[in-house]
Image: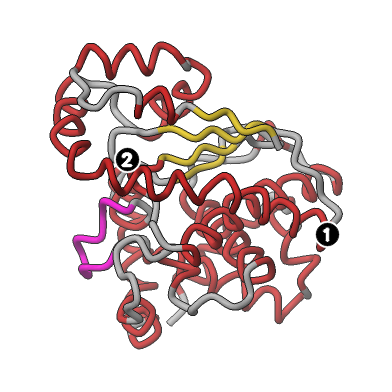
């Protein structure tokens, strides 16, 4: 694991302007390439809104930054001990413009980015989020070793996203087994100390499942991602990222049906997306 830390460069300015913010981005082109390509529009409107929020969130960013490097080292060590997996890729620490909180890059063995302005401040949330993102990396590494037709993977298909988030959630439970149950889905970002997210999801599973399937059929990819996967979505039910709950339910059912190892590698099957769609359509 190699941490590329851009945060001191951001914090070096007590108050940012549009010019200094863009200078910060230019200092670390590799750190921001994936972020602005896939996760955040690179517009002056977006930056100006972020500039209005940075002063009030500066303390939050510093508090997260104080904890995160050590947590990353701890979680990485647990993966090495439990799964004999060594992370040799880059982990980027950035201050973004209030889009994704963390993501793996579009690589077979992916780099990982954490955007500190969107991360939870408490230890449980940070540990679980770190374990979740590293879980994506483990999933892809194991699949690559087992043999995968990578050029034909439909990365932008949100049925596949559903499954992949379920696998990463499973790994996060294995690596951080003692967090409150809802933290594996919310990371504490929006419902700190509040179990209402998980209670709502469990009590309304079928309704949520069918709503996702209907949206999958009629919304475009960007709309579907924002509503069901983004921390900035959740307009339909008032709760964000409910796709993570569905992904976990699907993966756990597959794990019970065919075993953990086969469920983790199941996406190698060319017909796998059809299986997910069938599961979603069932009442």
- According to the picture, the residue beneath numbered tag 1 turns out to be 81
Please indicate whether residue 24 sits to the left or right of residue 76 in the image: left
* Residue 109 in which image quadrant: top right
Please indicate whether residue 83 sits to the left or right of residue 183 in the image: right
Q: Position of residue 254 (x, y in %)?
A: 67, 73
Q: Position of residue 181 (x, y in %)?
A: 49, 79
Closer mark to the observer between disc 2 and disc 1: 1
Q: Position of residue 91 (x, y in %)?
A: 60, 35
* Residue 44 in which image quadrant: top left
Please indicate whether residue 269 sits to the left or right of residue 123 in the image: right
State which region is magenta.
231-239
Mark 1, residues whose alpha carbon is within 10 Å: few (<14), some, or many (≥20)? few
Mark 2, residues whose alpha carbon is within 10 Å: few (<14), some, or many (≥20)? some
Residue 233 painted magenta: yes
* Residue 175 in which image quadrant: bottom right
Residue at the spot 33% in from the left edge and 43% down from the top edge: 117
Residue at the spot 28% in from the left edge and 22% down from the top edge: 13
Residue that sits furthest to the bottom in the current view: 203
Residue at the spot 28% in from the left edge and 40% down from the top edge: 98
The quadrant in which the N terminus is found is: top right
Residue at the spot 22% in from the left edge and 36% down from the top edge: 54
The residue lying toward the viewer, choosing from 131 and 63, is: 63
**Residue 99, numbered label:** 2
**Residue 42, numbered label:** none
Residue 94 painted magenta: no
Local SS, label 2: loop
């Amino acid at each position: 694991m190699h941490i590329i830390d851009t945060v001191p460069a951001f914090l070096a300015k007590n108050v940012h302007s549009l010019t200094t913010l863009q200078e910060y981005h230019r200092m670390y082109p590799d750190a921001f390439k994936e972020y602005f390509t896939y996760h955040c529009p690179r517009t002056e409107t977006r930056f100006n809104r972020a500039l209005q929020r940075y002063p009030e969130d500066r303390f939050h960013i510093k508090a997260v930054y104080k904890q995160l490097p050590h947590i990353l080292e701890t979680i990485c060590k647990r993966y090495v001990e439990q799964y004999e997996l060594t992370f040799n890729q880059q982990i980027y620490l950035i201050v973004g413009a209030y889009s994704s909180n963390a993501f793996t890059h579009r690589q077979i063995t992916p780099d990982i980015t954490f955007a500190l302005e969107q991360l939870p401040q408490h230890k449980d949330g940070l540990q679980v989020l770190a374990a979740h993102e590293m879980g994506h990396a483990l999933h892809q590494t194991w699949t690559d070793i087992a043999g995968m037709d990578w050029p034909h993977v439909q990365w932008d298909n949100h049925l596949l996203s559903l499954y992949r988030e379920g696998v990463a959630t499973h790994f996060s439970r294995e690596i951080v087994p003692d967090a409150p149950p809802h933290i594996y889905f919310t990371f504490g970002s929006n419902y700190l100390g509040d179990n209402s997210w998980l209670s709502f999801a469990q009590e309304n599973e079928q309704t949520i499942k069918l709503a996702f399937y209907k949206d999958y059929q009629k919304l475009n990819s960007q709309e579907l991602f924002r509503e069901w996967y983004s921390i900035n979505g959740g307009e339909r039910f008032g709760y964000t990222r409910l796709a993570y709950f569905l992904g976990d339910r699907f993966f756990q059912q597959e794990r019970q049906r065919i075993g953990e190892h086969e469920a983790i590698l199941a996406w190698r099957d060319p017909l796998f997306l059809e299986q997910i769609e069938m599961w979603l359509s069932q009442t």
